[in-house]
Image (cartoon, grey):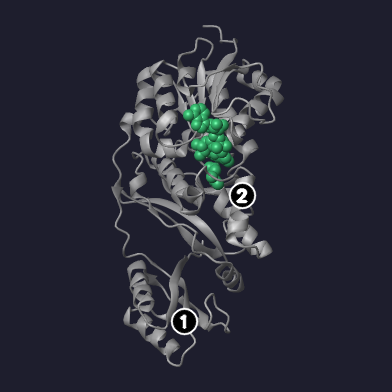
Amino acid sequence: MTRPDTSPLRIGIAGLGTVGAGVVKLLAANAGAIAARAGRPVAVTAVSARSRGRDRGVDLAPYAWEDDAVRLAARDDVDCVVEVVGGSNGPAKALVEAALAAGKPVVTANKALIAHHGQALAEAAEAAGVALRAEAGVAGGIPVMKALTEGLAANRIHRVSGVLNGTCNYILTEMAATGRGYAEVLAEAQAKGYAEADPAFDVGGTDAAHKLAILAAAAFGTRVDFAGVTTEGIERITAADIETAGDLGFAIKLLAVARMEAGGLEQRVRPTMVPRESLIGSLPGVTNAVVLEGDFVGTCAFTGPGAGEGPTASAIVADLMDIARGAAGPLFAQPAAGLRAAERLDYSDEHAPYYLRFSLLDRPGALAALASAIGEAGVSIHRMRQYGRGGARAGAVPVVIVTHDARREMIDGAVARIAALDVSAAEPVAIAIEEI
Ligand SMILES: NC(=O)C1=CN([C@@H]2O[C@H](COP(=O)(O)OP(=O)(O)OC[C@H]3O[C@@H](n4cnc5c(N)ncnc54)[C@H](O)[C@@H]3O)[C@@H](O)[C@H]2O)C=CC1
Ligand SMILES: N[C@@H](CC=O)C(=O)O
Ligand code: NA
């Protein structure tokens, strides 16, 4: 029997923002427990960021500095690289490729990188015989990649769903709780370190789509198909939509769903109204949820913080500890070469009730024109409510409709007809309702 390696695992960290600084702090704060559990110390030796002098609340004096992050890969005192720079190309990709080529394991929080280049990078890691791990990149502190790679690995998973973007959940719940506006709450999420460098990735749904595509690959044994995710963000959701949803017993969530049916893969991210008291409907603040449905285990639900310094650092250090133990499993729960290409499922027949919000000029006949446009699109109305004057535009009145089950293309048809009416004062909003 060979003796276990008890020498320190020496880490080079690229990026010292919210996540990188969190990793430095966590490795220092819990060094003893980490060494005991991993069987050897995990110690930072070198770091890189854009600015050396910035105050990050951590003392960088003990660590070697590299201006060029990619050089971390070549350092003799770095055994393992942590990439927390961000971005699907540029220095993040160059560094990860250089580290793997040098036979060094990599831990990253960069879901954009993995969603775009995960297949090639995982194959490069396997060719080099080293680990590439990205737990922090998917639902932050929730150990969901580990669940798929280890605890649930014996199951065929047929559905993955949940809330995968902390910033959006923070915005939606703060707006609901405080009545504050979208822009103010988004700025607060940025200040707390939850948002991406470009928050359009959060509110536009792209970040959740990156994570969903990675989860789907690990859950279903398919290659990452980020381009196959139908994505819609929360940018057009207003405080009035959130309040009306509440009146109807619902909460609006940015729901991500991937499911495998008869070999076909559906992946979608969209604002959805879900029952307010449900697991998903009641998620507060930056909390994420991932629900995995397996053939033998049944349904497992995980909730926890999806973003922020501490939770993200927690996930990165857990990956580092697996590497220190020599026990890091494959990125996508199986060797990347064995992943099959995903066939996209045609789900155009899927029905759901929808919440529709229109803004109509307050004129005689406006409501009748709206109702007949909806009827012509083949959509049947379940409930309708007209609010008093005082819509976003002077002289405009918000009208909310809940439909019976309808296909999305029927809803899109109704929305297009109504948007073209001369009494329509603003672009309509359509949100699916799911009784999850
Ligand atoms: N903030 C969060 O809660 C979470 C972030 N992530 C991911 O973690 C990564 C980092 O995110 P944050 O720490 O929030 O970003 P951040 O913007 O706070 O930090 C980025 C760091 O990278 C450095 N950097 C930029 N260009 C560089 C270059 N060319 N060479 C070396 N360093 C460079 C910056 O100086 C900064 O220190 C991203 O991929 C993000 O998507 C993942 C999960 C949660
Ligand atoms: N911007 C992301 C950060 C974690 O992945 C989020 O808000 O969830
Ligand atoms: Na995670």
Q: Is residue 370 above or below residue 179?
A: below
Give the residue displayed 71% in from the left and 26% down from the top. Answer: 29
Mark 1 or mark 2, which has the lower sequence index?
2
Whether label 2 lies within 8 Å of ligand 2 gets the answer: yes
**Residue 39 rendering spot, x and y as whole percentages:** 62, 16
Give the residue displayed 33% in from the left and 78% down from the top. Answer: 377
Q: Nearer the viewer, residue 162 or 57?
A: 57
Secondary element at image label 2? helix
The reply to whether residue 142 is visible in this rendering is: no
Q: Nearer the viewer, residue 199 or 134?
A: 199
| Label 2 CA crowd tier, 10 Å (few <14, some 14–19, many 20+) | many
**Residue 386 rendering spot, x and y as whole percentages:** 53, 83
The residue tagged 2 is: 189
User: In the image as oriented, which residue stretches furthest toward the bottom?
Assistant: 364
Q: Which mark is residue 56?
A: none
Residue type indicated by callout 1? Leu
* Mark 1 and mark 2: Cα distance apart in space: 33 Å
Q: Is residue 156 above or below residue 14?
A: below
Q: Nearer the viewer, residue 282 or 416?
A: 416
Secondary element at image label 1? strand
The reply to whether residue 240 is visible in this rendering is: yes
Q: Quadrant of residue 317?
A: top right
Q: Quadrant of residue 141?
A: top right
**Residue 101 rendering spot, x and y as whole percentages:** 38, 18
| Relative side of 58 to 204, left or right | right
Q: Quadrant of residue 330?
A: top left
The residue tagged 1 is: 360
Q: Nearer the viewer, residue 156 or 53?
A: 53
